Image (cartoon, grey):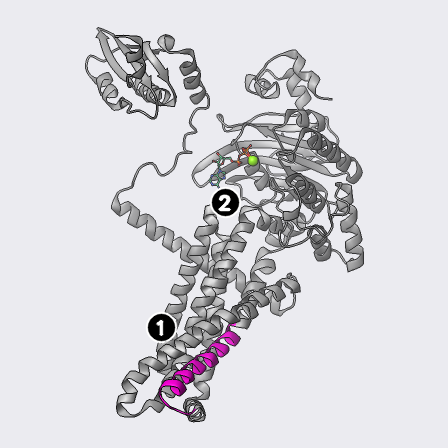
């Protein structure tokens, strides 16, 4: 564990740079403490999964990471930048390097898909309209929505909205991508394609990706690092590679989750 | 007792006490649609001295059950746990046992339950006052942030789309003309009638023109327009922004580093501030026409005499006063609508509440502002 005054540094065996460091984070709604003492590190290029039972505070943790909610105590660092203590301007500059896919897609309903993807490009780059259009089309094509540029969000299906939200999230080629339940509401094949897309994005953009999910196949396909939140003890009970957790963890709560409650050795077969 | 009789019997519970063990004999049909015994009587029995140590069940007489029985048993179970009485679920049907286990599988999160019971009057008054002061604080904070956004707008640094501004102008201006004309015309007619009843008794019916003219320009034009706009546009702002809050669209702006205040609120506030004075002028004019309609058709005045009289009453100050009021009301309505939209909770019913509150808040503020203007104009002798 890094000492608590200096900026977080690369520690121990893993030589990759620490990209997100969460230290002693306590999350609360008013007086109601949801989680305390969260400590974990996400390294550059990780696909980091936030796991845990329903209602334990996964979405809330994500809201803390992207600055929509203030920690009750504790700090969040992006590399050695203290996000929690930063000013509004510094934060906004940081936020521009994030791409976020919301649980509901959250596309702007009064704009077409191309305008949705193009808006951040128009606001934060010097591209002209023609170029913006081209790049928006490219991003939409990357998520399999070629030809839907002029559709409004209400005119496409829920799964397509998710993908369009993803196209918007990657509009500015972000360094870090946050996904809240990307595969919720998708059929198994689409959700598998989405997993492949996530892996592809990591490899091509070199982005760090943080995903909230409880889909086991998805977790074992994409994740190489994770944190496991437990509602009852109100803190994290495991961190690390979920494959290793499954192989070595002795905590019955973790085992139960990762084997869907059926503790048997065959469970490892359904990831590929 | 034969089988058919047993089938149609309503649910019943009998208690059998043998020194430390309480036996619960459940019989009949335990269905929600029937009258079911309440658990409170049984709970009272459990508390009676000497407190039993074990509770057992006999369900041999039970001919049917649904969630009615499960909820009854859960209540009994809670009472037993509080008193340290051991419960033996052996005697229960397997289905009931499984449902009870399922209901208890996830323990209640302590601290998660809120608003238990009804608070005493004094506490509720206190809560209400606290909520009110927090509401005031929110309003001031919002107003402050909006001022910053306006400042950035003036320095041409604000981020918003011109097309959004144009759309808001369209919504607040041209689209509202129809309803505003209708109401303003009727208000003019009503004012004229009210005046005519008295004034014609003195043969002074020409002064109806003064009454309608001054009434519309000084107060009624701006006031009626403001009330229409708060119901029409203020509510629409609150509903639109509230929905965007629910669907996380506002979060999406925030986390992209685009201020939703600049992007969403600024165009709406600007549009309403720009359009309200124009609408007010228009309403004044239509109201005067309404008065003229009454004057010409019922009081035998000539149109030219009516208009000459109207024009002679105007002062420049009246006119400016009306415009200032219109602009102020526009700002207040837009502010209330956008604030309530931003404060909206996370459900569809919250959107409805936000729209309602926006209308109430803006009408209250408009009427209060009207009073303040009356006092101020009186002091300034306008
Ligand atoms: N705005 C809020 N005010 C008060 N409590 C809240 C609020 N939002 C969420 N909570 C509480 O916080 C807890 C965690 O919510 P959160 O949405 O983070 O759960 P989650 O882990 O994402 O669950 P799921 O997997 O079902 O999406 C819940 O118990 C909920 O009661
Ligand atoms: Mg969630």
Determine whether B315 is above or below B123 in the image: below
Q: Is residue B290 magenta?
A: yes
Does the magenta-highlighted stretch encompass residue A34?
no
**The magenta stretch spans which residues?**
B276-302
- Label 2: how many residues lie within 10 Å, few (<14), some (14-19) or many (20+)? some
Instruction: State the residue at coordinates (70%, 47%).
Output: A168
Instruction: From the top left corner, tell me how far across and down residue B136 is, in percent.
Output: 41, 58
Majority SS type along the magenta span: helix
Q: Is residue B33 or residue B298 the one in the foreground?
A: B298
Tell me if I can see residue A113 in this picture. yes
Quadrant (top left/top right/bottom left/bottom right) for the C terminus of chain B: bottom left
- Helix, strand, or loop for circle 1? helix
The quarter holding residue A192 reads: top right
For the residue pair B53 and A76, the one nearer the viewer reads as B53
Q: Position of residue A111 (x, y in %)?
A: 66, 54
Mark 1, residue position: B371
Q: Quadrant of residue A123?
A: bottom right
Q: Secondary structure at mark 2?
A: loop
Q: Is residue A185 above or below residue B97?
A: below
Left or right of A136 in this view: B47: left
Residue at left offset 60%, top offset 51%? B254
Residue at the outermost top position: B18
Where residue B339 sits in the image (x, y, percent)?
48, 57
- The residue identified by callout 2 is B346
Q: Identify the image quadrant of the N terminus of chain B.
A: top left
Contact, mark 2 vs mark 1 (Cβ under 8 Å): no
Disc sitting over residue B321 in the figure: none
Whether disc 2's CB lies below 8 Å from ligand 1 is answered yes
Q: Residue at x 62, y 51 (%)?
A: A109
> In the rendered structure, which disc, 2 or 1, sits on the residue that comes first in sequence?
2
């Amino acid at each position: 564990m890094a000492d608590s005054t200096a900026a977080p540094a690369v520690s121990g065996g893993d030589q990759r740079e620490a990209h997100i460091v969460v230290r002693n984070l306590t999350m609360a709604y008013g007086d109601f403490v949801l989680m305390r003492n969260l400590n974990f590190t996400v390294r550059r290029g990780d696909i980091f999964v936030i796991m845990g039972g329903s209602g334990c505070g996964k979405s809330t943790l994500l809201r803390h990471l992207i600055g929509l909610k203030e920690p009750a105590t504790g700090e969040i660092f992006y590399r050695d930048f203290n996000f929690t203590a930063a000013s509004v301007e510094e934060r906004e500059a940081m936020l521009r390097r994030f791409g976020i896919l919301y649980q509901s897609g959250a596309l702007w309903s009064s704009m077409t898909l191309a305008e949705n993807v193009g808006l951040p490009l128009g606001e934060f780059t010097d591209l002209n309209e023609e170029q913006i259009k081209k790049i928006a089309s490219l991003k939409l094509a990357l998520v399999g929505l070629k030809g839907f540029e002029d559709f409004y969000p209400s005119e496409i299906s829920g799964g397509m909205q998710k993908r369009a939200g993803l196209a918007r999230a990657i509009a500015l080629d972000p360094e870090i991508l946050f996904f809240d339940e990307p595969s919720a509401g998708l059929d198994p094949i689409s959700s598998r394609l989405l997993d492949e897309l996530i892996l592809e994005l990591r490899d091509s953009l070199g982005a760090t990706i943080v995903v909230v999910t409880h889909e086991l196949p998805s977790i074992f396909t994409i994740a190489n690092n994770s944190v496991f939140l437990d509602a009852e003890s109100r803190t994290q009970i495991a961190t690390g590679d979920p494959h290793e957790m499954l192989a070595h963890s002795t905590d019955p709560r973790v085992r139960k989750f990762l084997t869907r409650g059926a503790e048997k050795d065959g469970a490892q077969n359904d990831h590929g | 007792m034969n089988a058919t009789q047993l089938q149609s019997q309503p649910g019943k519970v009998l208690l059998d006490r043998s020194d430390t063990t309480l036996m619960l004999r459940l019989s009949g049909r335990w269905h929600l649609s029937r009258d079911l015994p309440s658990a409170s009587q049984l709970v009272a029995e459990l508390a009676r001295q000497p407190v039993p140590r074990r509770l057992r069940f006999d369900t041999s007489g039970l001919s049917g059950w649904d969630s009615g029985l499960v909820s009854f048993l859960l209540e009994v179970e809670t009472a037993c746990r509080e008193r340290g009485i051991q419960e033996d679920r052996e005697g229960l049907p397997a289905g009931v046992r499984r449902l009870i286990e399922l209901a208890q599988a996830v323990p209640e999160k302590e601290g998660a339950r809120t608003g238990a019971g009804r608070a005493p009057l004094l506490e509720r008054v206190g809560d209400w006052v606290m909520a009110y002061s927090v509401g005031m604080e929110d309003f001031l904070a919002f107003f402050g942030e909006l001022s910053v956004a306006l400042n950035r707008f003036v320095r041409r640094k604000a981020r918003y789309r011109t097309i959004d501004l144009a759309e808001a102008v369209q919504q607040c201006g041209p689209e509202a003309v129809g309803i505003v004309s209708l109401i303003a015309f009727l208000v003019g007619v009503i004012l004229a009638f009210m005046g005519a009843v008295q004034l014609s008794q003195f043969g002074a019916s020409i002064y109806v023109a003064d009454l309608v003219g001054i009434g519309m320009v000084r107060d009624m034009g701006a006031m009626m327009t403001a009330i229409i706009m708060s119901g029409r546009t203020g509510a629409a702002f609150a509903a639109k922004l509230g929905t965007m809050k629910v669907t996380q669209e506002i979060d999406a702006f925030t986390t992209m580093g685009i201020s939703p205040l600049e992007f969403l609120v600024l165009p709406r506030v600007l549009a309403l501030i720009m359009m309200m004075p124009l609408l007010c002028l228009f309403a004044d004019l239509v109201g005067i026409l309404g008065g003229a309609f009454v004057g010409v058709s019922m009081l035998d005045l000539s149109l030219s005499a009516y208009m000459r009289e109207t024009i002679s009453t105007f002062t420049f100050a009246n006119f400016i006063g009306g415009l200032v009021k219109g602009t102020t009301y526009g700002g207040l309505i837009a502010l209330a609508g956008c604030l309530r939209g931003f404060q909206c909770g996370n459900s569809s019913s919250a959107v409805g509440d936000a729209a309602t509150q926006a209308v109430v808040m803006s009408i209250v503020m408009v009427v209060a502002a009207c009073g303040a203007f009356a006092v101020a104009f009186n002091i300034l002798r306008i």
